[in-house]
Image (tube, rainbow, N blue to C red):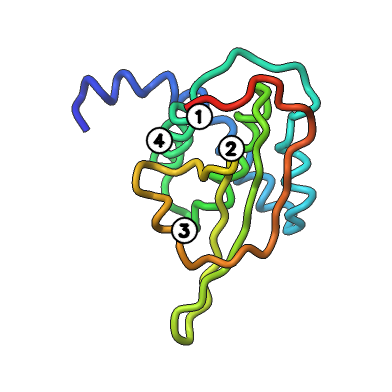
Amino acid sequence: MTVRSKLRAAPTVARALPWVVRARWKIRRTSDLGTLLAAHDFGAAAPRPARSVDSLRRGVDGALRVIGPREEHCVPRGLALMALLTRQGDRAVFVSGVRRTGADLRGHAWVLVDGVPVEAEGGEAALAGFREQFRYESRGPGPRGSRS
């Protein structure tokens, strides 16, 4: 990443950083996924100014790089994306799944908008083989529809 692109990304990362920190903080205080998701679902609130889904994803991913890999990133990433997307009026779906590879069982969480995973380009292939175990759909009407 060039210095110029890092400077351009700074406002997006700065906007996402408090939500990533909030997600990690709440994860340390409760293990109940339903409670965590309800605390990050702002679907019933008045919509905020809209950003592209890709911009929000890049901001959250950048914020996770800033605070460091203390644990797996998928749950705090999903919670932060859920909060940012629902705050701007998008309908978001938090999905948790598992994949078995030999004797290993691996869990993962991701977010969908209009049925499409909010992943980096090519990242959707990484979700292949995961069997959905849990799904949480945001509250509210999601009046703006999809944006990319």
Q: Secondary structure at mark 4?
A: helix
N-terminal-most mark, 1 or 2? 1
- Tell me if 120 is positioned left or right of 142 in this view: left
Q: Earlier in the sequence, mark 4 or mark 3?
A: 4
Q: Which mark is residue 127?
A: 3
Disc assigned to residue 45: none
Q: Are marks 1 and 2 in contact (CB under 8 Å)?
A: yes
The nearer-to-camera label among 4 and 2 is 2
Q: Which mark is residue 62?
A: 4
Q: Secondary structure at mark 2?
A: strand
**In 3D space, how far apart are the residues under numbered discs 4 and 3 (Cα atoms)?**
20 Å
Residue 141 occupies quadrant: top right
Where is residue 9 drawn, in percent x and y? 35, 23
Dot placed on the residue nearer the N-terminal end, 1 or 3: 1
Residue 23: image location, x then y, percent: 62, 42
Q: Which label was assigned to residue 53? A: 1
**Residue at horizontal 73%, vertical 49%?**
136
Q: Quadrant of residue 61?
A: top left
Q: In terms of depth relative to the viewer, which is nearer, 115 or 106?
A: 115
Type of amino acid under label 4: Gly
**Disc number lying in front (4 or 3):** 3
Q: Which mark is residue 113?
A: 2
Gap in Å between the C-alphas at discs 4 and 2?
Answer: 20 Å
Left or right: residue 92 compared with residue 17: right
Distance from label 1 to label 2 (Cα)? 8 Å
Q: Is residue 87 above or below residue 64?
A: above
Circle 1 packing at 10 Å, graded few (<14), some (14-19), many (20+), is some
Task: Give neighbour class at mark 3: few <14, some 14-19, many 20+ (Cα, 10 Å).
Answer: some
Instruction: Specify the amino acid type for callout 2.
Output: Val
Q: Position of residue 113 (x, y in %)?
A: 58, 37
Give me the C-alpha separation between circle 1 and circle 3: 18 Å
Q: Amino acid at mark 3?
A: Leu
